[in-house]
Amino acid sequence: MKYKVGDKVKIKTWKELEKEFGLNPVGNINCKLPSFINTIEKELNALNTNRILTIRKIDEDYYNTYLMEEISCHWSEDMIECLVEEYKPEPIYTRFEILDL
């Protein structure tokens, strides 16, 4: 397993997952798990706009998945973008900085 209990991880966006894995016939993402469903995406966005979750448990009995503190469902490694410490967001420029570029 790439991550451990207590790690803070950034979850990929729906568009990133859709591009990488495609959609199944009912419109959910085809990840390692049976699927990443749109209700989880909605819950994640409502709870946490920065998409950062904390690993609570590793479930080796269910496809080596992660359980998070914030949202109670299984997450596979392919849904995770990176550790939060490795995440470097794009800089946000003001309109004045953009004009100076």
Image: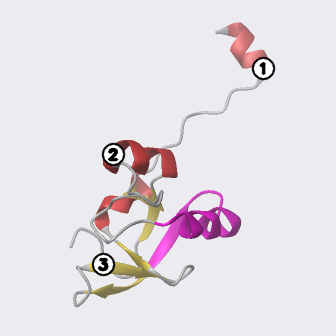
Q: Quadrant of residue 47?
A: bottom right
C-beta proximity under 8 Å, tags 2 and 3: no
Dot placed on the residue nearer the N-terminal end, 2 or 1: 2
Count the labels in the image: 3
Residue at the top extreme, as displayed: 100
C-beta proximity under 8 Å, tags 1 and 3: no
> Residue 65 has which mark?
3
Q: CA distance from mark 2 to mark 3?
A: 19 Å
Can you say whether 58 is above or below 94 in the image?
A: below
Kindly state the secondary structure of the residue where label 1 is placed.
helix
Please tell me whether mark 2 or mark 1 is closer to you in this view. Answer: 2
Give the crowd class for mark 2: few <14, some 14-19, many >=20 residues within 10 Å: few
Q: In the image, which residues are magenta?
A: 37-55
Residue under the point 56% across and 60% down: 51
Q: Name the kind of residue labelled 1 in the image.
A: Arg
Q: Name the kind of residue labelled 3 in the image.
A: Thr
Residue at the right extreme, as displayed: 96
Kindly state the secondary structure of the residue where label 2 is placed.
helix
